[in-house]
Amino acid sequence: MHTFSADPGTPSSVQSGLGRRLAARIAKFDARLFQIAFLATLLSIGVLLRDFSLRPEQMALTFAAGLATQWLWVRHLRLKNVGLLSAAITCFGLSILLRADTLWVHPLIAALAISAKFLIRVGGKHVYNPANLGVILAITLLPGAWISPGQWGNDLAYALWFVALGGLVVQRARRMDISWMFLACFLGLCIARFAWLGVPFARGLTLLTHQTQSGALLLFAFFMISDPMTIPNRAGARLFYAAAVALAAFLWQFYLYRPNGLIWALFLLAPMVPLLDRLLPGARHQWQPAAGLPAAGQKGDAVAPAS
Amino acid sequence: MRSSLLLSTLAGCCAAALSLSAQAFCGFYVGKADTTLFNEASQVIVARDGERTVISMQNDYRGDLREFALVVPVPTVLRKGQVNIGDKRIFDRLDAYSAPRLTEYNDENPCDRRRYERDKRSDMVPAPMAAAPAARASRSLGVTIEASYSVGEYDIVILSAKESDGLETWLTQNGYRLPRGAARALAPYIRQNMKFFVAKVNLREQAATGVQTLRPLQFAFESEKFMLPLRLGMINARGPQDLIVYMLTRHGRVETTNYRTVKLPADMDLPTYIRSDFGGFYKAMFKNQAQKDGNRAVYTEYFWDMSWCDPCAANPLSPEELRQAGVFWQGGQDSSNNSFAPPQRSVPMPPQGSQAMLTRLHVRYTPDTFPEDLAFQETADRTNFQARYVLRNPWNGSVNDCPEAQGYFQQLHVRQEKEARQLATLTGWELGSIRNRMDLRGGNFTPSGGSDGGGNGWWPWRQN
């Protein structure tokens, strides 16, 4: 596992002078800043190159409502060391995923999703990934709201970018195991399905490539299910949870023939996380490691949860 | 008699103050680009509400009718009452109503300052978004004849199969000539427990209809699967094929969930000479867009509430025409809202509560770029969209007519250059030849001339 306090990928020969100072400085960054940078890049790609039917006003209202809600809750609960970063990530997520033909859907959902983070909590952790909850609330309760799972298309270059950028983000958050486990299980189930359908090998390969190039799948794996605050603390529990979400998403899509299986599977299985945390305790994730202490997750997956 | 098997290319189985409201606009509808442009285009109408689906398929088969046969994977066993003969005119009506269109405006006289100022303001208004044997031998092959009947000129059997090889053998023994690779293409559908709708033409009945071409087939069924099995049609496909799908739904726009659905570039000004060859422009533009996206996208050409249009390329379909198109929910036993008003009027207007939305999707596909069958979802999106292009005829005056004319021609020059560049970007045509055809006369401000240029009977037809 990587830590925040040193850059393990940098060869020692380079770690002198400027290199070391740069590595130290990068290590001090909150992983969420990287996440915000990448989500902003993705949103820009989507809006500029991918014909997202997202209006600038909708985006602005999402951020205004989301950040204001976070600020109000932090102030109301007198929380310390809680900033606006995670709210910004939620706002990016909602902008990337949610589509609406009115202007009021996005801000309302941003406010509800972020409020839920403060209201629906078990064992000191919020239960739902706010963007995931927001999208589900919008498409089930509000008129004129939808998500477009096909919006990213299946272009290889984009897929590689997702993996590269997403991988980096999760690496910073050091809970990458869940992303890879999820992808392995979901794609494994797809391969099993192709075999069961009697699809010839060459075409099966084409179909598998089509799946692995799905922007929606990669975005989900690297930016949503990997949210360290809403997944089990212990590594073993995380892997089990990833497999369960993959199976649920697969059944939703290929057995029930319903769209948006990924989003629904995560929403339906999120309540499992508090249960898994109770049965298999582990150290809670900390966005900013306390000075002198090992970052959460490092060698600490099996220790008792922080109070 | 041996019939060659024409595996179907398409087949069906398978607010408020803050509202982003559509803006109506004035303009004159002058032309459309319908499906006759695309020779290889197949057309299908899908009417769906909940899990109930009516699919209409139009075949443009022009060979010997004795040689015609159609195989369509369907999710359930279709009984006689669930199959109907459609009317080709409905396809033509939907095509005409939803085709990409050209509208035309005339520039006002710049010398009328007040009107000019008003036009300038209206120019700043954003472009409107507005916004379809023997039973024993069969069993030994694992093939079951689930139903067998005739509807109109078609003799139909519904088959279920255990193995694709058995099905292939059955079809071959019964006089169908299968393209190579058919068994492998059929196998996944068998595994998914889908049935096969197989239709041949009954020549005597066909002669009695007095119609030269084949009439469309319609089926009604209930299934959670909202998809079109595109793959079967690719077995013997040569080069890219076009598919136009007319999706009729109750609530909102339809899009694909496993491919990117893209709105075609629309609502832009084009050089006025396009008027004489709008079809050619549209074909080039579509080809260029499909190539840019590597034939990997599905294009939305039209999305509108079926009770009106603006501008109208053709009048909206009447409630009777909609029923013939498969819209089973309007005013019937499944309707929770019976307020559908007959849309037949000279100037169709925004409805008070219509029940059918039309999404026109255009796919250009190849076996490599569309490895999976198309899967769809109905979204909550109700923002109107149309592939509409605008011609603006310059004012037919002289630069010396009034002081304002100078400014007008300067603006005209900039506008025409923009139109030329837009056309080049959209179609991939050479900018130089576009400018030549536009007759810009060396870029001076002389106007180019104003004259340039199953079971419970919910399906919409009567039970036989």
Image (spheres, rainbow, N blue to C red):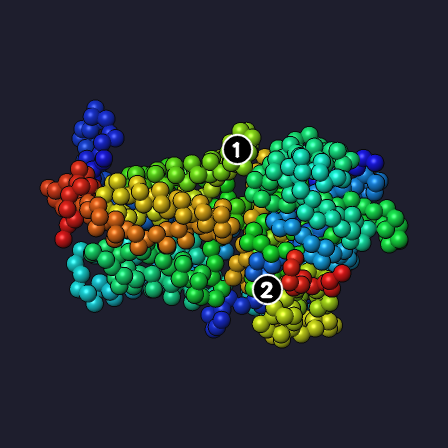
Name the amino acid, label 1: Gly
- A16 with respect to B355 (left or right): left
Q: Is residue A18 left or right of residue B158?
A: left
Residue A172 seen anywhere in this rendered image of the structure: no
Which structural element holds mark 1? helix
| Crowd class of label 2 (few under 14; some 14 to 19; many from 20; radius 10 Å) | many
Residue at 55% in and 29% down: A202
As drawn, which residue projects farthest toward the top? A13
Q: Identify the element where label 2 is drawn.
A: loop
Image coordinates of residue A141 in percent, x first then y, are 43, 65
Pick the residue in front: B451 or A9. A9
Q: Which residue matches tag 2?
A: B250
Chain ID, mark 2: B
Residue B259: where, in percent of width, then height? 54, 45
Q: Nearer the viewer, residue B168 or A144?
A: B168
Q: Residues within 10 Å of mark 1 (few under 14, many from 20)?
A: some
Write down the quadrant of residue A165 in the picture. top left
Q: Position of residue B357 (x, y in %)?
A: 61, 63
Q: Which residue does the image show at 63% across and 35% down from the upper left?
A: B164
Q: Which residue is label 1 attached to? A: A204
- Which chain does the residue under circle 1 lie in? A
Image-based side of A127 in relation to B224, left or right: left
Question: Which label is found at residue B341?
Answer: none
Location of residue A148 with respect to B340 vertically, above or below: above
